[in-house]
Image: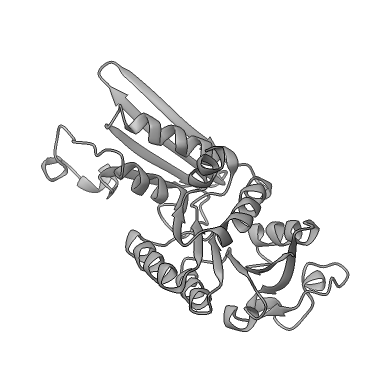
């Protein structure tokens, strides 16, 4: 039996790569795609190729029939409504879109548990990014003092990135920095110290030439540890982790945050 998958954002940068991989997987079936710009036409034709028999809908609500898993690679403005619509239909969800807050995730977790479905969310579905996050969580047990630098292209609207936000919130579960100079005592411009997320200062750079890079700098007296993940210019790094999440989410109830959580669970 195959899992029926709907990809929201199926004509987008990452969504298309994921949808193409689902089509090629023997244990998954791509039921439909969601794209307002391509609604009503065949997905293969929307990609500029021959028809592939996959319909494209304008909204997630229209696309959920016969779906087991919704994969969302859309935008920060739409993702929460998409997730809640799927949960209300008792459909599992994989969230690849960024922009959700800690409060959003708490509400999603509660709704998913009430509906008896699973949700897997990751700020970054790259396997190497997941390993970097796992390493950072280990380091935070021994090095509470850290700051995060979030690099992305000049066109990226959300700040910080989902990768950096998730990292900061996950690190807060392990330890919290205690700055020697409290932020309110900063001389000059306190804004230069970044935004505080989960007790960690996060600095977002938006410049041409970057895709997504995330760096966490740990420090102790007279030494530093830097853990950094750099993404390339294609969506390929995010496909394997998303497929792993699609296959794992039906066996979960409630929210799982972080691809590293799934990877570590698989090792146990």
Q: Indicate the position of residue 195 as horizontal and vertical percent values.
A: 29, 49
Give the total of numbered labels.
0
Q: In this view, does 228 lie above or below 80?
A: above
Q: Indicate the position of residue 172 as horizontal and vertical percent values.
A: 30, 44
Q: Indicate the position of residue 43 as horizontal and vertical percent values.
A: 77, 72
Residue at (82, 72) in percent of width and height: 45
Q: In which quarter of the image is residue 248?
A: bottom right
Q: Is residue 128 left or right of residue 216?
A: right
Q: In this view, does 183 lie to the left or right of 61?
A: left
Residue at (78, 62) in percent of width and height: 23
Q: In which quarter of the image is residue 44?
A: bottom right
The residue lying furthest to the left in this view is 185
Q: Is residue 177 above or below residue 252?
A: above
Q: In this view, does 180 lie above or below 101?
A: above
Residue at (50, 78) in percent of width and height: 85
Quadrant in the picture for the N terminus: bottom right
The residue lying furthest to the top in this view is 222
Please say which color scheme the image uses: one colour
Residue at (62, 78) in percent of width and height: 64
Q: In this view, does 180 lie above or below 34?
A: above
């Amino acid at each position: 039996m195959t899992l029926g998958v709907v990809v929201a954002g199926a004509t987008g940068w990452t969504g298309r790569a994921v949808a193409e991989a689902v089509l090629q997987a023997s244990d998954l079936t791509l039921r439909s795609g969601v794209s307002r710009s391509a609604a009503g036409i065949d997905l293969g034709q929307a990609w500029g190729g021959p028809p592939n028999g996959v319909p494209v809908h304008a909204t997630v609500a229209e696309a959920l029939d016969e779906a087991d898993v919704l994969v969302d690679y859309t935008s920060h403005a739409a993702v929460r409504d998409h997730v809640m619509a799927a949960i209300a239909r008792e459909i599992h969800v994989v969230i690849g879109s960024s922009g959700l807050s800690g409060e959003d995730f708490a509400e999603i977790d509660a709704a998913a548990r009430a509906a008896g479905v699973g949700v897997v969310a990751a700020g970054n579905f790259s396997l190497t990014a997941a390993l970097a996050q796992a390493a950072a969580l280990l380091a935070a047990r021994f090095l509470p003092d850290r700051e995060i630098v979030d690099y992305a292209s000049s066109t990226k609207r959300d700040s910080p990135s989902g990768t950096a936000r998730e990292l900061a919130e996950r690190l807060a579960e392990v330890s919290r920095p205690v700055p020697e100079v409290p932020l309110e005592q900063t001389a000059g411009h306190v804004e230069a110290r970044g935004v505080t997320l989960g007790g960690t200062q996060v600095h977002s750079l938006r410049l041409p030439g970057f895709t997504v890079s995330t760096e966490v700098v740990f420090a102790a007296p007279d030494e530093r540890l830097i853990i950094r993940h750099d993404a390339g210019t294609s969506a390929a790094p995010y496909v394997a982790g998303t497929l792993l999440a699609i296959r794992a989410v039906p066996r979960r109830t409630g929210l799982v945050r972080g691809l590293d959580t799934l990877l570590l669970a698989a090792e146990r």
